[in-house]
Amino acid sequence: MIVMKFGGTSVANFEAITRTIFIVGSKLDQKPVVVVSALSKVTDLLYKIADTAATQDTEQTKELLGQLRERHVNLVKELLEQSPMIMEQALERVNAICDDLDKLAYAVCAVGELSDRNKAIIISSGELLSSTIICFTMNAKGIKPGFIDARTMMVTNDSYLKGEPIVDEIAQRVPGIVAQAYEGMNAVITQGFIASNMAGEQTVLGRGGSDYSASLIGMAVDAERIEIWTDVDGVRTADPRKVQNTKYLEKISFEEAAEMAHFGAKVLHPLTIEQNAITSFRSRTSLVPCRANTIGPGLFLQADYAIGGADGTLGRGMQWQGMSLWMTLRYGKTPWITSSYIPTLAGRLFFLSELAGPLVAECN
């Protein structure tokens, strides 16, 4: 079994969803559990709906709700044009989700008060809408998906807007729910980000929490691997929006990925890396290409030693970092190169002698 998580840009529109379903369809023999985010920018719109409703601006709230419904209804019609019966069922479900959202948003407008609990319900509507649409479309494309409401298996504490997962409870619930959803099906789809507390009240994991959801599900079902699909083609040496001519990191250690995430790299959520560290030590695979966009078993690199300053930042320390890499590759770790002895510094690589080959370092 594998877990495949698709972010908002991977389910943003007709083209993206069609591509996502093709990818899932190519891996049915691996029993995929598909975790999806809301459509791109929809969560932002839902936050805006919640905040606008709290100001009792009924007209603006109505306009924003209309935008949300229109986008999803139009997407259903576009995706399921050739399957009118399935389209009708999908539209019925999409409109029902939007109707529930409308009622809650107008109730918030009426009282002018937005509780964390109600905000969690509002902002989680995007995942319910996207997963519903993708589930019906998978069906129309010949894939038989089982649908799971993530709130039945993802359990957190009582923090409505940034729920802390109760891992033991999740590990107990997920395998049975996934197994039941798979009966007679060849894929399963569920939502990232959304959860519930022990009382059944809705919570969310916080922004970017869909990756975390996928990692928790992967842990619970003992997945072979967890794939995080996004609109970028891998982990790069720097933010390509800020630095030109970035390069792919072909290999990465678990600790390095975690540090990159904690220091703000957008491609991976910090808690996703942290959760996967728990299960990945069982893997016999030491390296994984970053361009495969996979995390989980296989990403942890049992290195012989650390090398400092490999990815580097464009600053005054770059020249020293380059020299540190050059020296360490040739002469091994030494107390004179601190980063080869202290593997907690940001921007390090890990050196594995067995796979090193004829490495040539470039100095800035």
Image: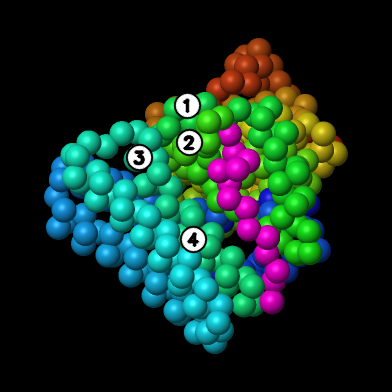
- SS at badge 3: helix
Q: Can residue 103 be seen here?
A: yes
**Magenta span of residues:** 142-155
Mark toward the viewer: 4 or 3:
3
Residue type, label 1: Asp
Residue type, label 2: Glu
Which residue matches tag 2? 201
Which residue matches tag 4? 130
Q: Eyeballing the image, is 129 above or below 208? A: below
Which residue matches tag 3? 118
| Circle count | 4
Mark toward the viewer: 4 or 1:
1
Which residue matches tag 1? 158
- SS at badge 4: helix
Are the two marked residues, 1 and 2, in contact with CB atoms closer than 8 angstroms?
yes
Q: Eyeballing the image, is 244 above or below 318? A: below
Residue drawn at x 31%, y 53% as measured from the top left: 103
Whole-percent x, y for residue 70 in the image:
33, 70
